[in-house]
Image (cartoon, helix red, strand yellow):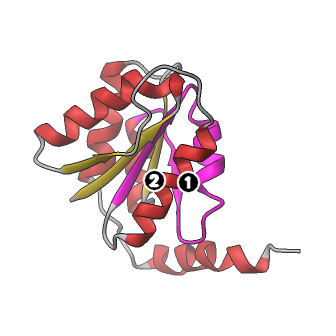
Amino acid sequence: MKYFIGADHAGINIKAFVKELFEKRGHEVIDMGPFSTDRVDYPDYAAKVCKEVLANEGSKGILICGSGIGMSMSANKFDGIRAALCHNEYSAKMAREHNDANVLCLGERVSGYGMVEAIVDAWNDASFQGGRHEGRVQKINNLYGSCRA
């Protein structure tokens, strides 16, 4: 599996940790930056990751900022991205199984390393169940054009 990962200055430590976790599990991880703790704007990195996820069928993204909120709000502006901010294993598992989330958002200032590892494992190990959830995900996908003024 190919993953694109990005953060802002407040998520750089967890980004490095998550990248290493995925690489140890044999996944390809493309680090979209940043590569220092200098202040950056999270929407810029959300855009970089989301564009790559959309351009590379079957890939997924991981975005990290201080709370995860800014990244998730930015990512969900992209048609075709279903970003989920997860703070525990259950929400990560459900995001994949029921919502077919293709981007995982994390908050470095919210979740510790142990919890982040559990979230990443739950999200990565789960897969979309389809079935009754298929129509709901399609409705999510269709919202983009219908919500424009």
The answer to whether residue 69 is magenta is yes
State the residue at coordinates (48%, 19%): 37
Q: Quadrant of the N terminus?
A: bottom left
Q: CA distance from mark 2 to mark 1?
A: 6 Å
What secondary structure is found at the residue carrying circle 1? helix
Residue 47 position in % (x across, y down): 55, 54
- Please provide the residue range marked out in magenta: 60-88
Residue 95 position in % (x across, y down): 45, 54
The answer to whether residue 43 is magenta is no
The residue indicated by pointer 2 is: 49
Q: Say if residue 98 shows up in the picture.
A: no
The residue indicated by pointer 1 is: 47
* 56 in relation to 111, above or below: below
Res 69 quadrant in image: top right
Identify the amino acid type marked 1. Answer: Ala
Comparing 135 with 22, the one in front is 22
Q: Say if residue 79 shows up in the picture.
A: yes
- 10 Å neighbourhood of mark 2: few (<14), some, or many (≥20)? many
